[in-house]
Image: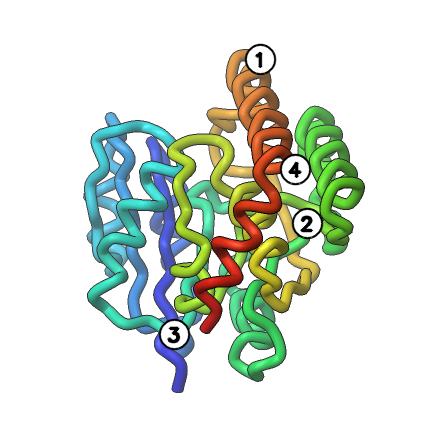
Amino acid sequence: MKRIIVIIPAFNEADAIGQVIGDIPSDLVTEVVVVNNASTDTTEINASNAGATVLYESKRGYGYACLRGLAYTASRNPDIIVFLDGDYSDHPNEMSDLVAPIVAGTHDFVIGSRIKGISEKGAMLPQARWGNRLACFLMRWIWGVQYSDLGPFRAIRATSLSRLDMRDRTYGWTIEMQIKARLADLRITENPVSYRKRVGVSKITGTLAGTVKASIKILGTIFRFALISGHLRRKLSAHKD
């Protein structure tokens, strides 16, 4: 049986985190790790009470939290790592379908596509849909990879993720992973996932400042990697499994 660890970055998700953890299939997952990203509410307490391993990351940023989780999982020897948001917008009970291609050995990286799945009306704000569309168009144009979404609900073979040498500390985490996965020639697929209105207000697309910062970071990441694609491809190819 595959060892599957779930990493959930969480900043002020006290009202949602218990529901997220509770809906994760317990017979599938070895460990649930919640990274409390300097929350000012009871996220840490609620996550612990729900049965998760709770880590603390004082530097705020999605990438910082993910990297903190990865540093911990390095000693746990997982086969598969799943990333999931802590706001209950995703459906954790769909995790079995998400990891199935990796368990079957046909793929290394699976993105949960909200675009291909069923989204509750109003769950994805217009600015999020527009940003996804633009980013995916640019990745297709530059690297020829067919993505439909930058969805945070995703699964990846642990050894493949280690090869990618993830670095981003903030909003560019998901797109860095997708670009590097392409350059590393990982076997990539998308799985339709359901999506609902999150609990509370989004810290990114729910505010003008968050939307602008995320957009600048994502576009900047795309163009930066476009400039160094050749170097990155050689570097990532040198560390194949």
Q: Is residue 76 left or right of residue 169?
A: left
Residue at horizontal 57%, vertical 41%? 175
Mark identifier at residue 190:
none
Q: Amino acid at mark 4?
A: Ala
Quadrant that contains the N terminus: bottom left
Quadrant that contains the C terminus: bottom left
Residue at horizontal 78%, vertical 39%? 137
Q: Earlier in the sequence, mark 1 or mark 2?
A: 2
Distance in Å between CA atoms under marks 1 and 2: 22 Å
Secondary element at tag 2: loop
Q: Earlier in the sequence, mark 4 or mark 3?
A: 3
Marks 4,2: beta carbons within 8 A: yes
Nearest to the eye among marks 4 and 2: give it.
2
Nearest to the eye among marks 4 and 3: give it.
3
Crowd band around label 2 with a 10 angstrom C-alpha radius: few (<14), some (14–19), many (20+)? many
Which residue is at the front of the view, 187 or 25? 187
Crowd band around label 1 with a 10 angstrom C-alpha radius: few (<14), some (14–19), many (20+)? few
Mark identifier at residue 208:
1
Outermost residue, top side: 209
